[in-house]
Image: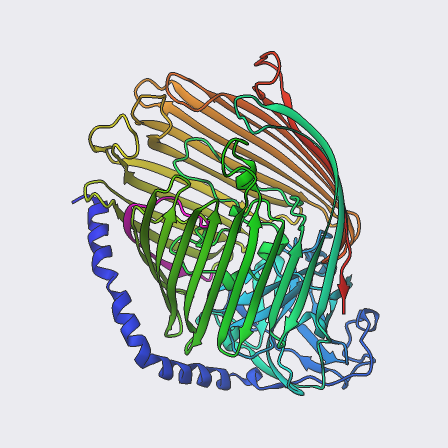
Amino acid sequence: MPMQHRSTRTLLAVFPMVLVLIVGWATVSCAEADNRTAFVESVPNRRPLTIPRIERAPRLEEFVDMQSEHAWKGRLAVVQGFIQRAPDDGQPATQITKAYLGYDSLALHIVFVAHDSEPRKIRARLDHREAIAPDEDQVGIYIDTFRDRRRAYQFECNPLGVQDDAIYSEDSDSADEGFDTVWTSKGQITAGGYVVLMSIPFKSLRFSHESSQTWNIALWRNLGRRSEVSWWPRVSSQYRGFLSQASPATGIENISPGRNLQFNPYISARALHSVGGRDPNNPSYIGRSEMLGGLDAKAILKDSLVLDVTVRPDFSQVESDQPQITTNQRYELFYPEKRPFFTENSSYFDVPMVVPSQHLLFTRRIADPDFGARLTGKLGHYSIGALFADDRSPGESVPQSDPASGKRAFFDVFRFSRDLPSHSNLGAFYADREFAGSYSRVVDVDTTLGVGRTWKATLMAAYNWNRGLDGSAFSGSTVDATLTRVSRGFNYIGYFLNRSPGFQPAMSFYDHSNWRELGQTLAYQFWPKNAWITRVWAEVYAARNVHYDGIKNWEGISPTVRVDVKHNTTVSAYLWEWHDVFSHEDFAQLNHVTNFPLVRAYGLAVQSTQARFLRLKLSTEWGTRSNVDPPAGQAPVQARYQQAEADLTFLTSRGLTVTNTYLFDHNANLQNGRSIYNSHTARSNWNWQINHELSLRFIAQYSAVLANPSFTATPTVRGLNEDFLVTYLVHPGTAVYVGYNSNLSKPGPAIGPPDPNRFVNDGRQFFVKVAYLFRL
């Protein structure tokens, strides 16, 4: 029996564990809660920490000698005895860390004194905010102000005081990196390690109005060269999540976040030169200059709800998208949201789906808004999210003769969830997009169930109604279910997906509808006591996909092995075996279902930060696959392919970071070896962080697709893009940006006499933006 058929049958037999575990959850949740409580109370350093009130904020200079005999001895709470979570779970940290905590009327202050027996090996780079690399030394704190062990503020710094902040969600095991708030930090490398001071204003936090506060906290340190993460209190990798193992912190009394009003006005000016026009057959150059102004406002309601309102928001792309291979793709590529208004508190709108990059609400569908409002937060056991925004882009993209010309699309989104025991929840979601009489609406009910200490199950059911501009109507549903286990040893992911043909919500991101899929990944981690190999990860993924017609099906299997070498290098190897199936609905020229023979692909990858000045990622994949972009009128055929990616980042402690990326994709005819296309993308990103506030960035990217029209409909194109940005960032909300970008293409737009051998500048922009944050 072929391997993929055996794996599919095994998969079908194992997945009913989902139903058994969900039923059993109700009976084990109380016992599990008792077990967790017993575990928490059994660890000596899990006892409550009392944080004292102090008269003034500590200064970094008072701790740089790294001695216990300092001016604050006996006046601050002291935390020590950090325990490893990785790589040696439960063992004492290899380097000594002490943390000192205190608060005054305005802020919570934390001083980390991180000793290091080899201070010359400390990894710390001066970089822009939120750019701390995983291999850098760093310290941080989680603060669960509502003590629900579900969400916490996350603050961290590297030894030079570079900041990063987020809101961590225990239910989804993810961090909302869109959260940006105002706080201060300083860091200094010393002869015996490094010292970091964090001061977190209370007006940057949300907490109850009670006069006496009890929070849950957890502190951690990352030793970069060893990939060692140690915690206080102990946070074991045998348990899923961090907050369930945090310690209570008491003694914080008579504090207030203030009136919690923020106003963030901006002014921007830009000069544009681009190709446009409502008639795509008759493009023209458009040049204009404009000055814009807008306002973002924020108000805190009932201490925990956040109301954001924006008028004429400026969503000019300060961050650029990472390059991806775009050739021979059947489905839309995913580019993450980067605009601040939509990224902050976006976790309140998350719905559990099988594929992490798929979203029931994908805010990049709101391309060009004029105004928006968002309400997010938590009331007791309920989490709430509401969003309203308009979008000018649909009405601007149609000819002036179209009745929809000049009209706007409007988005309404609502989401709420209710906390349940054992880190479980029950949620519902509704979203509506209205445009010129057409609409797309989706409603969802979902649940996340914590099953025991390491298992988690999710179930999502959604229904979608649509009406097009021509009055046509269609609808459909989807069901997504997952079962996962995360532990130090055995790990598991099982999933089921049932997406009907009519499920096509306009505000969502998904690859396609009309399919059912069942899949699972079984993996195990080994932690050998070896001087060179620190971890071995072995997994097998198997899946089967059946379309609604009951005839077409896809199935595949992929074993993978990953080896961690001396903590900072990972080598991966994998095998893919699968077969594709196409029919008339995929390609009009097919009058019957076409089953391709079994194909095989191989992959190798290396990632390393072994050297402190160099970060590299090398990967390659080769084998056979389908050419899904054949010439017009031809059916897809199998092809031989090769892909490669190389990322080399040169790092300095003086603020200069250079990242060079190269992507290669090649398809060749399976019978005669003739090239179908070659795709090349080369990108160089230079970032110079002059100090904590001022940075310069330059990006140059060249791309070329050289195609053979005898074998593919992919055109031969070349492009060159340049991007320059000067940033002076005082803190989130207060900044000055000066930027320029330009794009050249060949062949360019059909403007003027045709000349396929020249690059045409089809877009350039110069802009200046100034913003200032007022906090009341």
**Residue 284 lies in what quarter of the image?**
top right
Where is 29 relative to 18, above or below? below
Task: Tell me the magenta residue range.
Answer: 507-529
Q: Pick the quarter of the image with the N terminus.
A: top left
Does residue 133 show up?
no
Where is 83 relative to 325, above or below? below
Where is 342 relative to 745, above or below? below
What x and y, as percent, mark residue 324? Answer: 51, 38
Relative side of 35 to 607, left or right = left
What x and y, as percent, mark residue 604? Answer: 43, 41
The structure residue drawn at horizontal position 58% and vertical position 43%, both measured from the top left corner, is: 392
The structure residue drawn at horizontal position 54% and vertical position 35%, both measured from the top left corner, is: 397
Is 124 in the magenta?
no
573 vs 27, nearest the viewer? 27
303 vs 20, nearest the viewer? 303
**Residue 742 lies in what quarter of the image?**
top right
95 vs 139, nearest the viewer? 139
The structure residue drawn at horizontal position 45% and vertical position 54%, both measured from the top left corner, is: 432
What x and y, as percent, mark residue 57? Answer: 80, 76
Q: Pick the quarter of the image with the C terminus.
A: bottom right
